[in-house]
Image (tube, helix red, strand yellow):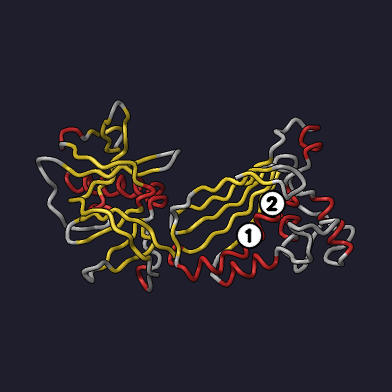
Amino acid sequence: MGFTDAPGFYFLVIEGEETELDKSVIEDLLDPIMHSVRNSIDHGIESLEERRAVGKPEEGMVILKAANEGNMIVIEISDDGKGIDVEAVKAKAVERGLISPNKLLTDPEAFNLIFEPGFSTAKTITSISGRGVGLDVVRRSIEKLNGTVTVTSEKGKGTKFIIKLPLTLAIIQGLLVRVGEEIYSIPITSVIESLRIKPEDIQKIDNYEVFNIRNDVVSLLRLNRLFGIRTEERQDYNFIVIVGTAEKKMGFMVDSLIGEEDVVIKPLRDQFTNSPGIAGASILGDGSVSLIIDVGQLLELGLHQEIEARRVRETHSR
């Protein structure tokens, strides 16, 4: 979408529209997200003349992106504008008596100051922002949802607001899989594909179990071993769910694939709260409980635990 009601012409790009949240949470997020977008437009995007002078495209870009990441919903509002002027923030903070004139500010400290009540470096009031309503409104609204909001910026390149909310507030589409008698949900946004492989297709490389798919070597993680679930490992073929991100991917071995289903995330309590690789739980249509797998955490922890378990088994078998 393109707009001109701003210092310069800009495009608003929206990504991750399929990310789902409870309706009441979305209503509470509307104002803080809108204010963050307005802030990016009015404070971030330069005028046409300024962008031409520094060799930037005449059209500015504001990106509103939502995604599931591990056990969090992450919403990012970023722009390719001029970034936050740390010196201007410091001058305003000194003027308002928030800091001493001799205070040496790091960039993160300066960025944090913009969330102070009523803080604004806008020199004029426009239809977009500079109306005396500061970003403290954004922070308070997000904190009421048990979330956090942070900002990063690079002078001359742009600014990014990052809002993180607990996944317990979210509705996700999950791929249900069975491991032994247990049912797990893998967020479908992390699933690349599912397939069947024969046991002889699994090989070991430096104590890692791997398999080859279309000339690509993928690490294998057996969920039954990771979660300590008793199950008979098949002799004919194995179901594999390949998950991952742009940087890394891995194959989860499961007993069977059940199908896709929208699941509402529920918080975990007591001994389950800190279970590695588990982001939450959901109650399925038949009343059974399905644990939600934190794919990001398993990518980090899975291989380490699997290798350690294999080392112990090999030690006992000698």
Residue type, label 1 = Met
Relative to 200, 130 lies left or right: right
Closer to the camera in the image, 288 or 58: 58
Give the image quarter of residue 118: bottom right
In the rendered view, would you say 270 is above or below 238? below
Camera-nearest residue between 81 and 273: 81
Check disc 2 and report the residue beneath it: 40
Q: Residue at x 58, y 64 (%)?
A: 30
Badge 1 is on which residue?
A: 34
Q: Where does residue 196 sit, x and y in percent of width and height?
A: 19, 39
Q: Earlier in the sequence, mark 2 or mark 1?
A: 1
Q: Estimate the spatial distance between the alpha carbons at disc 2 and disc 1, rounded to whole Å.
A: 10 Å
Residue projecting furthest to the left: 236
From the top left corner, tell me how far across and down residue 114 is, in percent.
Answer: 74, 60
Q: Would you call the spot at circle 1 few (<14 residues within 10 Å), some (14-19), or many (20 or more)? A: few
Image mark count: 2
Which structural element holds mark 1? helix
Can you tell which quarter of the image residue 205 is in?
top left
Is there CB contact under 8 Å for labels 2 and 1? no
Quarter occupied by the C terminus? top left
The label number, if any, that marks residue 132 in the structure image: none
Name the quarter where the N terminus is drawn: top right
What kind of element bears circle 2?
helix
Report which quarter residue 53 is drawn in: top right
Q: Amino acid at mark 2?
A: Ser
Can you name the residue that lies furthest to the top here?
215
Q: Position of residue 292 (x, y in %)?
A: 34, 60
Q: Position of residue 237 (x, y in %)?
A: 14, 40
